[in-house]
Image: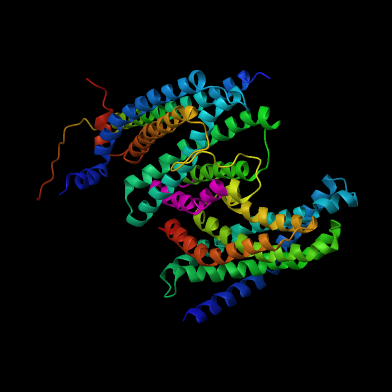
């Protein structure tokens, strides 16, 4: 029951995404734009860019994910599917987890794939790339999970745009600190494993707790 | 180095924020009571009940 | 029924709470002011100047109690919110949301006085060190709770959503508290303990404890005053509010 529900939800999400294939590229395009803006604002000189490349890439991914957060539950809230979720025989938190995973796979995963390309634009030193990808691989699901809680809290609201960002950013700060910090540590020759392990631990904790919190938030919002 | 200005500045910040913290809820309560008073006059709650509930 | 249990249930009645808060808020405010006056007098005129920091350390008597208050208020807010979410007690929703502005005010005082103290001590108004950064995030969390509460029209749903956010955010508190232990921080490590030996000279402690107690009493007063306003707002259509608001003949 649990797995068939998950499969049904995943197939539905993929089908819906396929029908609007163009939209799937938007987060990646936004990240590219952010990279371009930073590069131009910093003067475009390779040495200066290389020093901040990892941080800018982390920010580009984080901000792109933040903008995509609104679409997590909005479609289903608008057409009433979210209420069907409340009535489903499977736990609401499970559906939230599946939905968040699909959202991550369709918005953050393309960003991860695009990262080496974006890194080249910013002249990121090649030895920092593996640590950067590892920190993003651990950090972006964490961002998606925490973002899901915030998106669930604001799902009923119409003019919630900036509010989602304001609510999510304080929760995002520790993830950014450890994620970008791990690459910074590696760049200085220190061991990044500590920060990466903390991200991993946070991810495990969030995998369990965030769907529960988001489910509670959906119940509050739909009451 | 004279720290006096810094100490005064810090204590002034404290006093200002505490003053705001004291005034804001008082204003809110006053606003709520005023709104209730106006609402009562609008609805005319001081009318006697002309049509009491009946079973017929 | 046990008198305390009965009193607890009575508090849940909005008109009773209005009378309770109207009576006790001023008492708490005055008590807080008196204790703080004693503490501030001691801080400014009685305590000797620090051998290292000179007179600037007197800012500690504002900065530290405010910092403790900023965290205590958030913890209390999360506790009230949890009770409100689990048992759906309306009063706890009101109290939880009332904690937010007061807590934010104390966080602001902490950041501002810390910055003013830091300029002569460390030579800078700000540093991105873990203690300062996490305290700043705490301010953003407070503002987020307040913002979310104001963004939703239905008061009960609004307080429950904002309360959930507070519960999620309470995980930040241990990070703030232990940030000076876990990281190499510019900010001072833990010198004053609630239990056990403090590293501060005993002659300097009494005004600090006075300020701690004073700010807590003030917090209670402010909490009751704000809860009173929110209570009146939620009950605004009811007869007892109209009766209360009647101009005295």
- Give the color scheme: rainbow, by chain, secondary structure or one colour: rainbow
Magenta-drawn segment? C151-178
- Quadrant for the C terminus of chain C, please: top left
Q: Quadrant of residue C113?
A: top right
Task: Establish if A96 lies above or below A158.
Answer: below
Q: Is residue C153 magenta?
A: yes
The image shows residue C185 at horizontal and vertical percentages of 65, 44
Q: Tell whether A146 sits left or right of C76.
A: right
Please indicate, yes or no, whether residue C49 appears anywhere in the rendered image: yes
In the image, taking residue A53 as reference, residue C132 lies left or right, namely left
Residue, x 46% and y 68% (percent of image)? A92
Q: Compared to C247, does A57 lie above or below?
A: below
Residue at the spot 73% in from the left edge and 61% down from the top edge: A191
Query: How many labels sit on residues?
Result: 0
Q: Residue at x 84, y 45 (%)?
A: A42
Q: Quadrant of residue B29?
A: top left
Q: Magenta segment: does it hold C159?
A: yes
Please determine whether, in this image, residue B25 is positioned above or below residue A206.
Answer: above
Question: Residue C26 at what x, y percent from top left?
Answer: 33, 27
Q: Quadrant of residue A13?
A: bottom right
Q: Position of residue C240 (x, y in %)?
A: 24, 36
> Residue A138 location, x and y as percent?
66, 65
Q: Which is nearer the eye, A164 or C56? A: C56
Q: Nearer the viewer, residue A24 or A49?
A: A49
Which is more toward the observer, A52 or B4?
Answer: B4
Image position of A141 (left or right of C34) = right
Most common SS among magenta residues: helix
- Residue C105 visible in image: no
Q: Between C212 and C132, which is closer to the camera in this rendering?
A: C212
């Amino acid at each position: 029951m649990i797995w068939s529900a998950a499969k049904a939800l995943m197939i539905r999400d993929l089908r819906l995404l396929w029908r609007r294939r163009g939209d799937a590229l938007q987060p990646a395009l936004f990240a590219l734009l952010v990279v371009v803006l930073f590069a131009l604002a910093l003067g475009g000189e390779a040495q200066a860019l290389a020093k901040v490349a990892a941080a800018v890439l982390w920010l580009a991914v984080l901000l792109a994910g933040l903008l995509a957060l609104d679409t997590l539950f909005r479609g289903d809230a608008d057409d009433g599917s979210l209420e069907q979720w409340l009535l489903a025989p499977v736990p609401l938190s499970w559906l939230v987890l599946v939905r968040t995973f699909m959202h991550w796979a369709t918005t953050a995963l393309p960003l991860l794939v695009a990262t080496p390309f974006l890194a080249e634009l910013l002249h990121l030193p090649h030895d920092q790339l593996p640590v950067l990808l590892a920190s993003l691989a651990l950090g972006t699901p964490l961002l998606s999970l925490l973002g899901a809680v915030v998106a669930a809290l604001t799902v009923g609201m119409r003019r919630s745009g900036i509010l989602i960002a304001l609510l999510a950013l304080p929760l995002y700060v520790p993830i950014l600190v450890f994620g970008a910090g791990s690459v910074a540590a590696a760049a200085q020759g220190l061991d990044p494993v500590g920060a990466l392990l903390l991200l991993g631990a946070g991810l495990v904790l969030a995998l369990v707790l965030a769907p529960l919190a988001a489910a509670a938030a959906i119940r509050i919002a739909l009451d | 180095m004279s720290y006096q200005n810094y100490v005064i500045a810090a204590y002034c910040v404290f006093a200002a924020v505490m003053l705001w913290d004291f005034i804001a809820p008082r204003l809110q309560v006053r606003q709520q009571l005023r709104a209730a008073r106006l609402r009562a006059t609008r609805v005319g709650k001081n009318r006697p009940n002309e049509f009491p509930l009946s079973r017929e | 029924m046990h008198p305390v249990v009965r009193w607890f249930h009575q508090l849940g009645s909005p008109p009773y709470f209005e009378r309770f808060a109207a009576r006790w808020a001023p008492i708490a405010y005055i008590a807080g002011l008196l204790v703080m006056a004693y503490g501030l007098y001691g801080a400014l005129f009685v305590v000797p100047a620090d051998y290292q920091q000179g007179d600037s350390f007197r800012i500690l008597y504002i900065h530290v109690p405010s910092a403790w208050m900023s965290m205590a208020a958030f913890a209390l807010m999360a506790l009230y919110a949890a009770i409100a979410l689990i048992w759906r007690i309306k009063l706890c929703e009101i109290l939880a949301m009332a904690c937010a502005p007061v807590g934010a005010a104390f966080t602001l005082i902490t950041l501002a006085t810390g910055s003013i103290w830091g300029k002569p001590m460390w030579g800078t108004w700000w540093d991105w060190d873990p203690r300062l950064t996490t305290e700043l995030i705490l301010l953003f969390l407070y503002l987020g709770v307040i913002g979310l509460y104001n963004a939703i029209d239905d008061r009960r749903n609004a307080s429950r959503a904002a309360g959930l956010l507070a519960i999620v955010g309470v995980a930040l508190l241990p990070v703030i508290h232990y940030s000076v232990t876990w990281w190499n921080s510019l900010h001072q490590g833990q010198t004053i303990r609630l239990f056990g030996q403090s590293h501060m000279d005993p002659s300097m402690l009494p005004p600090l404890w006075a300020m701690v107690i004073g700010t807590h009493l003030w917090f209670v007063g402010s909490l009751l005053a704000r809860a009173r306003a929110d209570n009146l707002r939620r009950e605004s259509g009811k007869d007892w509010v109209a009766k209360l608001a009647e101009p005295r003949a």
